[in-house]
Image (cartoon, rainbow, N blue to C red):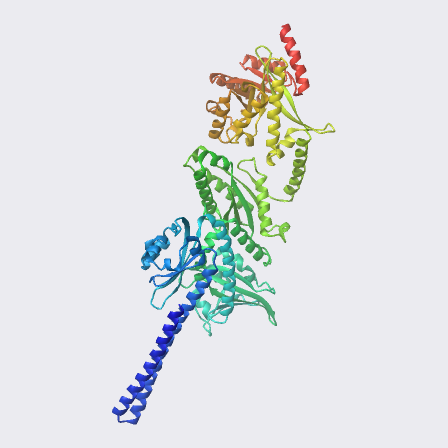
């Protein structure tokens, strides 16, 4: 580059000298020819003026050339400071420069890169053809390819190319920035730093151009309209009607020009909120060409003798924004869904929250909503990750489709999404939930039609007084917290407020107590007998968990099981129940009692584990209990939560020889058709049908019908909640196989159940 600059300087100097000599020679010859003195003076002036014009053109060309060389040198310095691949080149294929990061990773030297054959191995031929149309096609097409290194290895790279400036001969200078795909996270962090540096560059640019080519807008407290300068009129396509070629416009005109989503950012300006700081925001507005442009607005409100004056300087930054698109996409856009990521969402939320704090009176209302797809892990496990990613993309599109103007959505991690929802009415929020769930329910393809796809929401009001002084990250955590409270409750929504927070504190204390109870062995199993209605023998027992504190206080399962499920400690409790029930049952058999089946209840969290069959099999081997003496009880709603996956899990358990019972049948979906699909061995009639058997003919008919259908499918039946002999007789006459309830025995600890078995064994022997 230095040698080129010396040659250009020498050429310019020689050119100027030749022009001067030619001008003098021509002047002398013409001077002798022309007779009139006046004509001689005019001729001399014309020749000298022409010489100066030519000199000016040469100097201008030289300055532009030097300017291009300086720009190229500056870009080289920038490229050398980059830790990622950076390549400078031109469409005329006269310049090619690669930074140290590129040469270090690929092994190529500067001499190698001057060889067109080696360049063809690095960049696709169409990218370096020199034809603008090929370049445009390449830039719009695939930006990822493999670089064959000089050492024999290869690096899969991802590139983005931008036009930096145009040379005097019409060629374009471009910069290509690339990275190793395996180091994408480090690149994103580097791009964030670059983005911050660009922001500082923008500030310097604004200061340098504040008094030149900048649109101005003024608002006086005692006027209802705004003064717009001539430059801003040209930018926005407004008619310049004033004496100084500016104009006055009303607030409605500005609202029509500025994109509705960005109105909130200029609220402090339109309301004339005084402050010590100059506010700078970027908004989108309709420009004179009819398209939306990006404008930077810097404004401040001050007080003079007549009242408050708000002044703003406006610059069109559309070109700068377009150059930042590549950086913004990689730093702020989620790779899978192509919507904003968590980092960008929090940035937008902080900007919105900051703007709202400047506003007097009633602000726009924003809700922070967090959503996730119910049982997404099951969909991933059963349909595959490709289908799971496709579902995430569709969910993102559904959210974007249903948000209101001024709202935005982002994927904040996993299957969690967040929405900044603009509305003053909470009813709009609930309508949004309903619309999203409806659209989500129509998704099919890739096996998704076999799942009942739904979602849950947690949300909070952004402008609640309790949030004053909080950052947007803290507000987002509130909505995430509310979402977490819906775990285990499919298709639900929860709003965060002070009452929920207090309730969470209570649950947090109980979670701690549950953990301590597990460590201190405060949990105990009680057993309730199951009796044959044919001969009165004991055919099984149901294991029921009890929490007994050291002072003798008994905590009901309904009080601690939901808390344990939310905190995931239910898995530890279920492990205890499984081990202890199998151990106690094997002990009864070893004591010589007739072998019976022990029933345990599984929660959805336990049942839908991918390794639940292995876990149960390991426990059976460890305790020595034969699989045929273990019965897994599942509720109807649990089994139908994801019926296809439930059938797979049930079949795996049945292959081990384990029995499966359907608990509380008839209280959930009440669908007898599912009996044929589910591989169950025992149908358990809910106590709500049994309690009215003596007096309610409808209850008797329902119970009788269920028993007949079960028998046709070779499924045994058992009734729970039997408290009277009359109920027992009706069930026996209806063909029910077994019964369970206080009439036969209450739940009792292991030692009491041994006594119960002893008494029944003796009674059976006497009879």
- Residue farthest top in this picture: 766
Query: On the rendered structure, is 758 left or right of 447?
Result: right
Query: On the rendered structure, is 569 left or right of 373?
Result: right
Quarter of the image where one finds residue 521? top right
Location of residue 83 with respect to 536 vertically, above or below: below
- Residue farthest right in this picture: 551
Which of the two residues, 59 or 404, is positioned nearer the viewer here? 59
Image location (x, y in percent) of residue 370: 54, 44
Image location (x, y in percent) of residue 523: 66, 28
Which of the two residues, 505 or 422, is positioned nearer the viewer here? 505
- Residue farthest front in this picture: 151
Image location (x, y in percent) of residue 28: 29, 89
Image location (x, y in percent) of residue 743: 64, 16
Give the mark count: 0
Which of the two residues, 490 or 610, is positioned nearer the viewer here? 610
Which image quarter holds the N terminus?
Answer: bottom left
Location of residue 177 with respect to 369 vertically, above or below: below
Q: Residue at (30%, 92%) from the top-left corner? A: 38
Location of residue 582 with respect to 21 vertically, above or below: above
Q: Residue at (55%, 59%) from the top-left corner? A: 267
Query: On the rendered structure, is 339 left or right of 758?
Result: left
- Residue farthest left in this picture: 33
Q: Residue at (47%, 16%) from the top-left corner? A: 712
Visible in this render: residue 762?
Answer: yes
Which image quarter holds the C terminus?
Answer: top right
Location of residue 536 with respect to 503 vertically, above or below: above
Quarter of the image where one finds residue 352? bottom right
């Amino acid at each position: 580059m230095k040698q080129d600059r010396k040659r250009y300087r020498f050429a310019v100097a020689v050119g100027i000298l030749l022009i001067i000599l030619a001008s003098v020679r021509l002047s002398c010859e013409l001077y002798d020819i022309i007779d009139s003195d006046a004509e001689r003076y005019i001729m001399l002036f014309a020749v000298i003026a022409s010489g100066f014009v030519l000199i000016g053109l040469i100097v201008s060309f030289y300055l532009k050339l030097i300017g291009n060389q300086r720009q190229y040198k500056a870009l080289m310095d920038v490229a050398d400071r980059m830790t990622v691949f950076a390549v400078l080149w031109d469409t005329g294929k006269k310049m090619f420069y690669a930074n140290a990061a590129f040469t270090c990773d690929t092994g190529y030297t500067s001499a190698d890169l001057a060889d067109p054959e080696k360049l063809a191995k690095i960049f696709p031929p169409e990218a370096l053809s020199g034809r603008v149309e090929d370049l445009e096609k390449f830039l719009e097409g695939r930006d990822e390819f493999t670089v064959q290194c000089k050492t024999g290895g290869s690096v899969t790279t991802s590139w983005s190319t931008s036009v930096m400036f145009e040379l005097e001969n019409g060629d374009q200078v471009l910069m290509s920035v690339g990275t190793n795909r395996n180091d994408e996270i480090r690149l994103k962090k580097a791009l964030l730093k670059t983005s911050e540096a660009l922001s500082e560059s923008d500030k310097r640019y604004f200061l340098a151009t504040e008094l030149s080519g900048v649109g101005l807008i003024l608002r006086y407290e005692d006027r209802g309209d705004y003064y717009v300068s001539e430059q801003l009129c040209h930018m926005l396509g407004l008619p310049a009607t004033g004496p100084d070629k500016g104009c006055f416009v009303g607030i409605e005109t500005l609202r029509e020009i500025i994109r509705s989503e960005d109105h909130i950012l200029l609220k402090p300006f339109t309301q004339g909120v005084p402050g010590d700081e100059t506010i700078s925001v970027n908004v989108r507005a309709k420009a004179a060409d009819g398209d939306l442009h990006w404008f930077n607005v810097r404004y401040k409100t001050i007080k003079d003798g007549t009242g408050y004056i708000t002044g703003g300087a406006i610059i069109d930054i559309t070109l700068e924004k377009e150059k930042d698109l590549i950086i913004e996409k990689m730093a702020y856009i989620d790779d899978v869904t192509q919507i904003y990521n968590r980092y960008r969402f929090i940035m937008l939320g902080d900007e919105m929250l900051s703007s709202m704090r400047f506003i007097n009176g009633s602000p726009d209302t924003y809700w922070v909503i967090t959503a996730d797809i119910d049982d997404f892990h099951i969909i991933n496990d059963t349909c595959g990750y490709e289908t799971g990613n496709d579902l995430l993309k569709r969910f993102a599109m559904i959210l974007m489709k249903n948000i209101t103007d001024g709202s935005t959505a982002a994927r904040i991690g996993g299957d969690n999404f967040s929405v900044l929802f603009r509305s003053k009415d909470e009813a709009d929020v609930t309508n949004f939930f309903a619309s999203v769930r409806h659209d989500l329910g129509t998704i099919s393809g890739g096996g998704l039609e076999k799942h009942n796809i739904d979602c849950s929401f947690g949300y909070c009001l952004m402008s609640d007084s309790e949030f004053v002084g909080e950052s947007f990250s803290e507000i987002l955590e509130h909505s995430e917290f509310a979402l977490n409270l819906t775990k285990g409750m499919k298709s639900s929504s929860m709003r965060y407020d002070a009452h929920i927070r207090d309730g969470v504190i209570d649950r947090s204390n109980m979670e701690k107590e549950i953990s301590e109870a597990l460590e201190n062995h405060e949990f105990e199993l009680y057993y309730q007998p199951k009796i044959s209605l044919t001969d009165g023998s004991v055919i099984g027992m149901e294991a029921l968990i009890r929490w007994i504190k050291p002072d003798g206080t008994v905590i009901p399962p309904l009080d601690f099981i939901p808390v344990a499920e939310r905190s995931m400690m239910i898995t530890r409790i279920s492990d205890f129940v499984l081990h202890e029930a199998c151990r106690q049952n094997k002990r009864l058999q070893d004591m010589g009692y007739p072998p019976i089946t022990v029933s345990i209840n599984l929660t959805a969290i336990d049942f839908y584990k991918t390794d639940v069959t292995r876990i149960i099999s390991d426990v059976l081997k460890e305790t020595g209990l034969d699989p045929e003496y273990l019965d897994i009880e599942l509720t109807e709603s649990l089994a139908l939560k994801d019926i296809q996956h439930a059938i797979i899990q049930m079949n795996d358990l049945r292959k081990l020889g384990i029995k499966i019972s359907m608990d509380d049948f008839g209280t959930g979906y009440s669908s007898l058709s599912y009996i044929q699909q589910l591989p169950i061995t025992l149908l358990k009639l809910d106590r709500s049908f049994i309690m009215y058997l003596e007096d309610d003919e409808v209850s008797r008919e329902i119970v009788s019908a269920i028993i007949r259908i079960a028998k046709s499918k070779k499924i045994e039946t058992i009734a729970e909640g039997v408290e009277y002999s009359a109920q027992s007789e009706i069930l026996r006459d209806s063909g029910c196989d077994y019964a369970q309830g206080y009439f036969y025995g209450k739940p009792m600890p292991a030692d009491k159940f041994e006594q119960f078995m002893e008494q029944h064994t003796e009674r059976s022997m006497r009879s």
